[in-house]
Amino acid sequence: MSSNKIEKWEWAAEEQDYQIMVSIPNTPVPAEGFPVMYILDANAFFTMFTEIAQLQLFQPEKTGISPLILVGIGYPGEERFHPRRFADLTTPVEEKNIPSRPDGNPWPESGKAAQFLSLLTEKIQKEIQRKYPIDVRKQTLYGHSLEGLFALYTMFQKPDSFQNYFVSSPSIWWDQKSILNLETAFTTNIELKSPTKLFITAGTEEMAGDIFEDSKAMYERQSLNPKINLETEFFAGAGENHMSNVPAAFSRGLRFLL
């Protein structure tokens, strides 16, 4: 099995430049195109996920994973977690509703999730569909921690932008769990146009901010969602913490979503 082709290019936006990384399978293109997964915070996760996905292809009849395109959305430079992520991945919040940071430092700028969602779905996603052989019926959004919060935000606000949502250890605690208000509106008012899958995962050792319990509760509510087009699964990473559960859950999530 040959290595995937990797392409990197920059996307200049009004307030922030982004680094786009694309992993393309060196295999014949399916008639319908390749499934695609968009990876947020790609500086931290793109390389690892590309390697994990490729390993699954050694025995696809056992792993259940077929070739897919991975699109990483990150930031210029080598910093794994760029400060701009706080602005891109969070909704507006009053300062009194933000908990103190463990290190005592002030929080970076926040509250621009709506602008980032528009950039992602109206520009970057359309450019990827234009440049690469994408199966538009099999598009996944991956997010971990604050990105997981953003993935939920995307599903609740513009659910038909993606067919699959891979939500890892979401920061539901942000702004006194205001994401739950969007969840209620989604459950009450939005009808899914096409079959949609939601995979939620968290490690059992994630005690800070009740991440594990909040994630499990989100899954339980959505698994009972009356929208027949929403299929859900939850993976509890036994003994895993906020970061160790990322690789532990990735292959499991791929199998369910793809």
Image (cartoon, grey):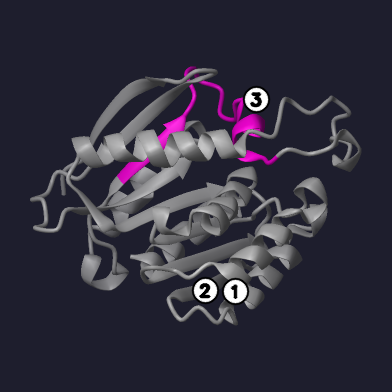
Query: What residue sits 41% from the left and 53% below the top?
Result: 161
Q: Which of marks 3 and 1 is nearer the N terminus?
A: 3
Farthest front residue in view: 189
Q: Nearer the viewer, residue 21 or 3?
A: 21
Q: What residue type is labelled 2?
A: Glu
Q: Nearer the viewer, residue 85 or 114?
A: 114
Q: Which is nearer the eye, 124 or 53?
A: 124
Disc 3: which residue: 83
Please, is residue 203 above or below residue 161 in the view?
A: below
Q: Which residue is drawn at 70% across and 55% down?
A: 179
Of badges 2 and 1, nearer the viewer stands 1
Residue 50 visible at all: yes
Q: Which dot marks residue 222?
A: 1
Q: Disc 3, disc 1: CB below 8 Å?
A: no
Residue 244 picture location, percent across and down:
60, 51
Residue 110 left/right relative to 113: right
Report the span colored magenta: 70-91
Asked which quadrant contains residue 164, the reply is bottom left
The residue where tag 2 is placed is 233
Mark earlier in primary sequence (2, 1): 1
| Label 1: which secondary element | helix
Q: Where is residue 143 in the image (x, y as percent from the top left)?
A: 53, 48
